[in-house]
């Protein structure tokens, strides 16, 4: 796991909808969440990594480990790289 990502976890919301809006701020919350779920399913290896931590699609929050996987596979939301 990338140490820079682990150090930055506190900068990101654990709520799935809030995180989705960071990736797609131009969309409504519902549309951003729908697109975010597509990102999760299309990113090669992300879904199995999340499922290994107990993730389910209906979850509303990410654990810190799940959040780290999202950031690692999808990259940091635009404007939040550092």
Image (spheres, rainbow, N blue to C red):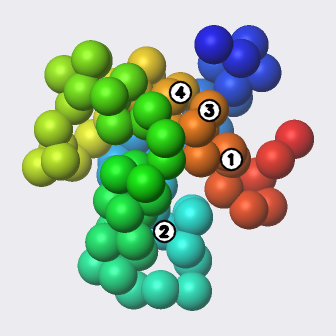
Q: Locate residue 4: give its quadrant.
A: top right
| x and y percentages locating residue 7 in the rendered image | 70, 19
| Depicted 27 relative to depicted 39: above or below | below
Side (left or right) of 21 relative to 51: right
| Depicted 8 relative to depicted 59: above or below | above
* Residue on which the image places disc 3: 72
| x and y percentages locating residue 49 in the rendered image | 38, 24
| x and y percentages locating residue 82 in the rendered image | 87, 41
* Residue on which the image places disc 4: 68
Q: Earlier in the sequence, mark 1 or mark 4?
A: 4
Q: Earlier in the sequence, mark 2 or mark 1?
A: 2
Residue 21: numbered disc: 2
Residues at marks 4 and 3 touching, judged by CB atoms closer than 8 Å: yes
Q: Secondary structure at mark 1?
A: loop
Q: Earlier in the sequence, mark 2 or mark 4?
A: 2
Q: CA distance from mark 2 to mark 4?
A: 17 Å
Closer to us: 78 or 73: 73
Q: Residue at image x 49%, y 47%?
A: 43
* Residue on which the image places disc 1: 76
| x and y percentages locating residue 13 in the rendered image | 47, 45
């Amino acid at each position: 796991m990338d140490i820079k990502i682990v150090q930055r976890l506190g900068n990101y919301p654990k709520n799935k909808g809030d995180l989705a809006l960071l990736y797609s701020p131009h969309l409504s919350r519902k549309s951003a969440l729908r697109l975010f779920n597509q990102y999760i399913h299309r990113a090669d290896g992300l879904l199995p990594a999340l499922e290994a931590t107990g993730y389910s699609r209906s979850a509303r929050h990410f654990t810190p480990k799940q959040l780290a996987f999202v950031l690692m596979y999808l990259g940091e939301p635009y404007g939040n790289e550092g």
